Amino acid sequence: MMLRRFHSCRKGSAAAEMALVLPLMVLILFTSLEAGNYFYAQHQVVKGLRDGARFAARHSFDEINCRSGGYIDSALAANVKTLARTGKLSGGTTRVKGWVDGDITVTVTCSTTTQATTGIYSSSESAPQVNVATSLSYDSLFNGLGVITNSFTLNAEQQATVMGI
């Protein structure tokens, strides 16, 4: 009689079900938060590099040119790195935790197509294109508690043709 009453009792079944489902729900919650933070950090890196490339593209041909295989003034390159990282030319906090100037490369490539040597570009010199790229380690929110860990990297690159303004 007591055994039959024990098997038919439904008290605590909701708590047992919750105990079974809770670990999966917590894992999904932390993974969602980590993925959201990863995509936000990636967006901030791309946005910063786009700002840096656009900033460099608006400088004169004296500072960025193709006369010696692709030249960029060192002070301008430092400003591009700082602007990409912080959004400001001086001071400011980094857009992504742990992002330093050493993670960013600024190079110049020179196009040889006929379209890039017409218009504002002289026919004797090709159009310089500024390339800003970065690769940095992702700083995990929960140190690997979710699926995305500190072993992930944030990679991005942006290009802009110099207008010589």
Image (tube, helix red, strand yellow):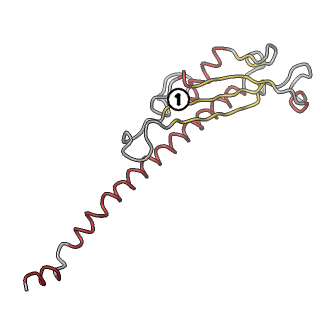
Among the 4 quarters of the image, the one containing residue 130: top right
x, y percentage for residue 152? Answer: 49, 38
Q: From the image, which quarter does the C terminus lie in?
A: top right
Give me the residue at 16% from left, 80% from top: 7
**Category of crowding for the residue at label 1, using alpha-carbon neighbours closer than 10 angstroms: few (below 14), some (14–19), many (at least 20):** some
Residue 12, horizontal then vertical, whole percent: 18, 72
Left or right of 61, for residue 98: left
Residue in the picture at 50% in, 28% down: 99
Q: Nearer the viewer, residue 102 or 124?
A: 102
Q: Residue furthest bottom?
A: 1
- Vertical side of 165 occupied by 37: above or below: below
Residue in the image at 64% along x and 19% along y: 77
**Is 155 situated above or below 124?**
below
Q: Is residue 40 above or below residue 164?
A: below
- Callout 1, which amino acid? Thr
- Quadrant position of residue 140: top left
Disc 1, SS: helix
Q: For mark 1, what is the residue?
A: 86
Query: In terms of image quadrants, where is residue 139?
Result: top left
| Residue 128 image position (x, y, % from top left) | 78, 24
